[in-house]
Image: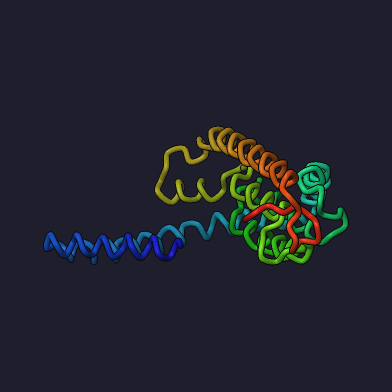
């Protein structure tokens, strides 16, 4: 669906430009966008490498394991249908820790691995399980203490105070996380009240 939306936007843009006789404007915008993308990526590399290094140091120092222990009870509450000693729990904790530090690039592979592990526990492979929906909501609206990527972008564009967004970002992500988890709990209750899915061995599931 996303591919179709982007295709329609591109085709519509070219069609309007051609109708107005300004097709060169679209071509120039495409080249300018590509150049800007490369510039932003190069600017992000140094900051992301720094924070990835800091995260590695924190891991070696045992800080991440302590964060994981602190988050353990929270994760157990949010994912009651996932066994405590299952590999998915470790990936979920790593994903949450990276998101807290604003390291989306580091959180994404952990989130993918967590989804793969949760799929192994899913009795209906064609339908997202409640745990998978919870992880998706939590990863999308995760609380961010240090918005590393946004700070890097602001630094790349020579912001006078690149870190001034820390407080507002924390507040916005807290509100988003509370809203996402509230919606997740509500849909879980609805799923529990539904008749059992014949393909799930009698266990109610949430539609993805």
> Residue 97, image x and y in percent?
71, 49
> Which residue appears farthest toward the right when viewing the image?
85
For residue 15, which quarter of the picture? bottom left
- The residue lying at 76 percent from left, 55 percent from top is 59
- The residue lying at 73 percent from left, 64 percent from top is 124
- Quadrant for the C terminus, please: bottom right
Q: Is residue 192 left or right of residue 175?
A: right
> Which residue appears farthest toward the left when viewing the image?
21
Q: Nearer the viewer, residue 55 or 16?
A: 16
> Residue 182, image x and y in percent?
66, 37
Q: Is residue 58 left or right of residue 164?
A: right
Q: Nearer the viewer, residue 67 or 156?
A: 67
Q: Nearer the viewer, residue 115 or 35?
A: 115
> Residue 107, image x and y in percent?
65, 56
Q: From what the image shows, is residue 196 above or below residue 159?
A: below
For residue 205, which quarter of the picture? bottom right
> Residue 34, image x and y in percent?
35, 65
- The residue lying at 29 percent from left, 61 percent from top is 32
Tell me if I can see residue 11 in this picture: yes
Q: Is residue 154 left or right of residue 187?
A: left
- The residue lying at 68 percent from left, 52 percent from top is 206
Q: From what the image shows, is residue 152 above or below residue 183?
A: below
Tell me if I can see residue 145 in this picture: no
């Amino acid at each position: 669906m996303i591919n179709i939306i982007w295709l329609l936007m591109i085709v519509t843009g070219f069609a309007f430009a051609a109708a107005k006789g300004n097709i060169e404007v679209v071509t120039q915008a495409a080249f300018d966008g590509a150049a800007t993308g490369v510039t932003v990526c190069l600017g992000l590399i140094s900051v992301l490498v720094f924070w990835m290094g800091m995260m590695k140091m924190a891991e070696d120092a045992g800080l991440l394991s302590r964060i994981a222990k602190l988050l353990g009870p929270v994760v157990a509450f949010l994912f009651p249908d996932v066994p405590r000693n299952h590999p998915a729990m470790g990936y979920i904790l790593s994903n949450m820790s990276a998101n807290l530090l604003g390291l989306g690039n580091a959180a994404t592979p952990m989130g993918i691995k967590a989804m793969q592990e949760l799929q192994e526990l899913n009795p209906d492979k064609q339908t997202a399980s409640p745990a998978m929906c919870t992880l998706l909501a939590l990863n999308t609206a995760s609380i961010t203490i240090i918005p590393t990527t946004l700070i890097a972008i602001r630094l790349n564009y020579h912001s006078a105070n690149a870190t001034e967004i820390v407080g507002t970002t924390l507040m916005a992500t807290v509100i988003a996380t509370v809203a996402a988890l509230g919606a997740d709990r509500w849909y879980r209750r609805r799923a529990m009240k539904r008749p059992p899915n014949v393909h799930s061995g009698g266990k109610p599931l949430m539609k993805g």
